[in-house]
Amino acid sequence: MPDTAAHAELDLDGAGPLHEQIRRAIAAKIINQHWRPGHRIPFESELAAGLKTSRMTVNRALSALAADGLVVRRRKAGSFVAGQSAIHAPLTILSPEREVARMGLSHRFDLRSRRMRDFDPDTDGTAGFARGEKLLHLVCLHHAGDEPFLLEDRLVSLTAVPQAAEVDFSARSPGSWLLEHVPWNEAEHEITAIAADTPTARALAIDPGAPCLSIQRRTWHGDTPTRATVTAVRLTYPGAAKKLVGRFRPGGLG
Amino acid sequence: MPDTAAHAELDLDGAGPLHEQIRRAIAAKIINQHWRPGHRIPFESELAAGLKTSRMTVNRALSALAADGLVVRRRKAGSFVAGQSAIHAPLTILSPEREVARMGLSHRFDLRSRRMRDFDPDTDGTAGFARGEKLLHLVCLHHAGDEPFLLEDRLVSLTAVPQAAEVDFSARSPGSWLLEHVPWNEAEHEITAIAADTPTARALAIDPGAPCLSIQRRTWHGDTPTRATVTAVRLTYPGAAKKLVGRFRPGGLG
DNA sequence: CAGTGGTCTAGACCACTGC
DNA sequence: CAGTGGTCTAGACCACTGT
């Protein structure tokens, strides 16, 4: 045994692409806390030599780990195990149609209100629309089977999406139409628990004041200075009916 | 002008690495809906020739787009613009300490209950612990400044984390101790709106029945067949106080 | 200013899959 | 079975940054 061996000691499992094996082997060392935060991972050149591969292949593994946040890389210094920071909960928000279908129920919705109006800074202040903008205000109630499932309260910018004025949203849900026809750049979600006000409670057939999960989404298109809000929507679910679920594996391990 | 030119027409902005420029240029075409879902993107070799670069560089751009879900790649067929599917809301859940600090307030917490008990399938059925397991049950109330902020109700497996029995959790919050000392593999979050029951309302100084945001997290370590639940926690926030915010840009554009 | 990661190249072979 | 993407190599040069 060489006395000053590099001892990479990464044991690859032989499954799949080599760069994936390397990535997994290093991720395992970090997750097992065999390499604690701050530990210096061997240099690319050392790993490449130890594993008898090229530096590009090792680089690919380490770059992926850095993108996942498990590793921090600094020129001239090396690659280090990152400190435990935040936990990410990547939620997937499906359209009402898909969500209801996944529950094994049939979906239908009623367009309960549709009107055009001007932007009102008092009411719509946080929605991010521009002053003087024409908006289309839509309210839809979505059903899962025969039960009310979701109240959708949406504003669409007629400046950004003039075609929306002509669409029959009683036949096609606003969300799916927008997703198909309108480009967007950026979205922001805000998830809160709220008490149902009287009209919401009536629509969803729950008691006034009952807890509801509220998902607000704003969607933009374009980059500054032409960036504009395309649509802003508030989805209100009866608290008992709705769970958001997200699963996370650090480093995509497994 | 050549009559049958490939017309890649990707205009690079010259900012940053070449593979990033290519990725952004293609992402822009997709987001602007200039290339609609199903559109065949030029082959790697075509793009490489058109942009006078190597296929590896183009491959890197297209692989990243595929990882982001904007592009689907099929051998022998080519690369295609993916259909709009789900919207992702990547939430970042901070520790109570960090979260309160970010609000500009000081954090403190009280350990309100600490006891060991056996796993009870009736109560803890969904938590995923094994039958007959010893659990440490902890209840903490976290404060933001002087206001109650978060009720933490946690079960820790003493099979997976025997050291936890000896830790003084009145000095160190369970979450931060676990994050530092216990390896984990996988986590699942469940976000719901619930009505505060009487003890919760009393602890959080809100009205019974008031809406609360509940975040349940289960954390595992190990792979099957040795996979075991390490800890399960329910975080209950007063609905008025807590917002989860996530921002998303398809393809990491911008 | 030396050494690390970041990027890029011009090839190569292979697996998979439509045709 | 021909053509695509997936992977890998053995180099190279450069940007950045600790020392």
Image (cartoon, coloured by chain):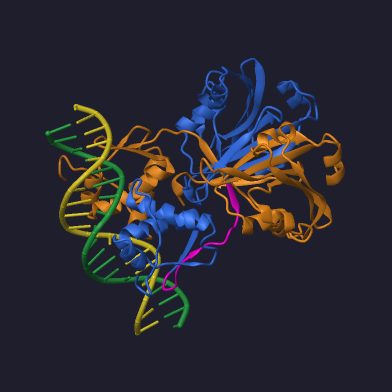
Chain colours: A orange, B blue, C green, D yellow
Image coordinates of residue A45 in percent, x first then y, are 22, 46
Picture layout, residue B192 above or below residue B33? above
**Range of residues picked out in magenta:** B75-88
Image coordinates of residue B55 in percent, x first then y, are 31, 62
* Residue B119 is at least partly visible in this image: no
Residue B87 painted magenta: yes
Residue placed most toward the observer, B105 or A20: B105
In screen coordinates, is A85 left or right of A81? right
Residue B82 painted magenta: yes
**Residue beneath the point at 69% across and 45% down:** A243
Quarter assignment of residue B61: bottom left
Image coordinates of residue B236 in percent, x first then y, are 67, 31
Question: From this viewpoint, which residue is outermost toward the front?
Answer: B1
Picture layout, residue A173 above or below residue A212? below
In screen coordinates, is B50 left or right of B222? left
**Residue beneath the point at 48% across and 44% down:** B185
Image coordinates of residue B18 in percent, x first then y, are 33, 52
Residue placed most toward the observer, A23 or B123: A23
Picture layout, residue B48 above or below residue B160? below
